[in-house]
Amino acid sequence: MIFCVCYLEAVCLGFGLRLRIWIREAMESTESSYASSPDPPRNRSPTPPKSPTSDSMEKPTYIRFLVSNAAAGSVIGKGGATITEFQSQSGARIQLSRNYEFFPGTSDRIIMVTGSIDDALKAVELVLAKLLSELHTEDGHDAEPRTKVRLIVPNNSCGSIIGKGGAIIKSFIEESQAGIKISPMDKSFYGLNDRLVTVTGTLEEQLQAIDLILSKLIEDPHYAQAMHGPPFSYAAYNTMGFAPNGTGGNFQNNKEDRTYSVTIGVADEHIGLVVGRGGRNILEISQVSGARIKISDKGDFVSGTSDRKVAITGSQRSVRSAEGMIMQKVAYATERGTD
């Protein structure tokens, strides 16, 4: 399974709507983190999210989240039938980044939904429900699993959902009973101004948390400004190499003899499939493609994830070839439901 947005990682716990969830919030500006655990489940009616003003509800907004490359096909459907149906049902526009156009540091594609807040939330619900149904089909369990969805939020807007001393994000956790974690800025990618907000819980808990988050974000002027930029403006990071000190540096790649490099994220449990017994798989990929492949040490993850860093360096053709072979191995394992 490739960790993503929709980044589905199931831990089956049952259909209960009130679950004990933990959160840890890491802020770029300080070393402190905010942690909160909702009280043990108790008999109470779920607290409805605060409704935004009618003007805000009608005002066009957007939301971006990640989905694994393997799962993207089920969202699109045969000939685009599924995504067309979702757009018709929700009234929102749904766009996906191109195949292998990933969010930096991951192997996940981006879904962007635009429309009024109600239409956007309906579209998100349709997409997440579809992905959850696929998960139920694969695992065969009746219990509703807790899953993860990773939202993309501009760094300048994260403060509006954190609040002073973490007060706002703590209130969102309490109201939704979902886990919410905001990643620190990934310094590996020069100029990247987006962070990942991971929401963990049942589908209902996730949707309530996303409603709360989006309702707050639409009040932030920085968030509105970002809507008018390119939705998938991450292609430049596919040509981003890494200098010895870990900072990004652009390499020219207009000629085949120029150094070209990408760094992708692969779930820690799937690294063994990439490496193979005695390193056989990774050696074969390197020999066939002609690219150099380096995997980060155990415990050295892409910021805010449990994905190991896989750096691929060589000519443009060799890097793309190696990347495709790695993704194929991981996608095959995901489809088979094996770790």
Image (cartoon, rainbow, N blue to C red):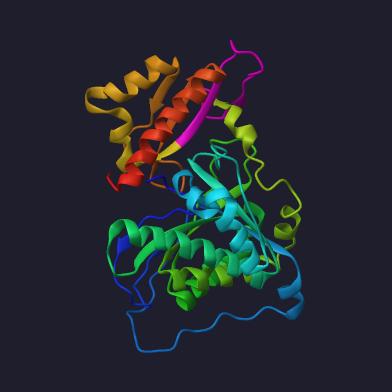
Residue at 41%, 44% in the rendered image: 2
Is 125 or 33 nearer to us in this picture? Answer: 125
Residue 122 colored magenta?
Answer: no
Let me know if residue 272 appears in the view.
Answer: yes
Q: Quadrant of the C terminus?
A: top left
Q: Position of residue 75 (x, y in %)?
A: 52, 54
> Along the horizontal axis of the image, is 262 left or right of 254?
left
Give the magenta-colored segment's residue range: 243-264
The residue most toward the left is 277
Residue 250 colored magenta?
Answer: yes
Q: Measured along the vertical axis of the image, is residue 176 above or below residue 5?
A: below
Q: Position of residue 315 (x, y in %)?
A: 54, 16
Q: Measured along the vertical axis of the image, is residue 301 above or below residue 288?
A: below
**Looking at the magenta stretch, what is its main secondary structure?**
loop
> Along the horizontal axis of the image, is 92 left or right of 152?
right
Q: Which image quarter: residue 148? A: bottom left
Q: Which image quarter: residue 109? A: top right
Let me know if residue 244 appears in the view.
Answer: no
Q: Position of residue 27 (x, y in %)?
A: 53, 55
Is 38 or 1 nearer to us in this picture? Answer: 1
Q: Measured along the vertical axis of the image, is residue 315 above or below residue 28?
A: above
